Amino acid sequence: MKKLVIDFDYTVFNTTAMRQAFVDVLVANHDISPEMYHAAERQIVETHGGYLLDAHLAALAVDAEEQAIMMRHCLEVLKGAGQWIYSDVKVALEAARESGVHVTLLSLGDPQWQELKIDASGIAQWCDEVLVTASPKVEQAAVFVGDDIVCVNDKGAEIDEIAGKYPDIQWFWVTRPEAPYIHFIPKTTHVQVSSFSEISAILTA
């Protein structure tokens, strides 16, 4: 059985648009600026090795009460997360599954934060399996072992790391215009695409 392994952020989900929605709601309702938001965000990522919503809001809020209010605003924003699934994803995943392809979503990051976004987005309805890991994806051996595996990812460095251990995977490097990793071109043999529509023919063949 062919297996499709897909990344979440910037691959199937427009994380940039979600982040902007957070900026908009927090700036509108609290005494912070976009610059303050992004500076605190960078500091959290550098300190913790990844993004943590709770820690980010704690850095922005003046006290626990304001942090709780900020969290309510962000959770309200996330109720609309389905709008940030890229428009080309749903049709491609539905077609893949109808053709017998096993679809695995594999996301790297803080499990609580990633699961919050993934659940809110509704992407799970088009997947057979959803996995979230705080450890490097290359350690998820069960996902990458097989004879006919296709992977789609926006991170060139992650593609190279996984391909170094599992060389038989067929890779698609998806380049969304707003993705932060678009200038890191993977050294691994890959097909560069801008949407899942370009992958559908290969998945359903």
Image (spheres, rainbow, N blue to C red):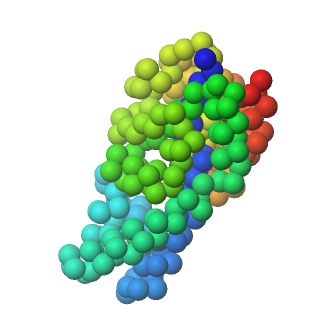
Q: Residue furthest left?
A: 64
Quadrant occupied by the N terminus? top right
Image x and y of residue 62, in percent:
25, 81
| 77 relative to 116, above or below | below
Viewer-proximal residue among 40 and 109:
109
Of all residues, the one furthest to the front in this rendering is 98
Residue in view at x 38 percent, y 37 percent: 133
Q: Position of residue 40 (x, y in %)?
A: 37, 68
Residue at left offset 57%, top offset 32%: 103
Residue 90 drawn at (x, y percent): 65, 47
Q: Quadrant of the C terminus?
A: top right
Q: Nearer the viewer, residue 28 or 103?
A: 103
Q: Is residue 12 left or right of residue 115?
A: right
- Point 69% across, 27% down: residue: 99
Count of numbered tags: 0
Q: Nearer the viewer, residue 170 or 5?
A: 5
Quadrant assignment, res 71: bottom left
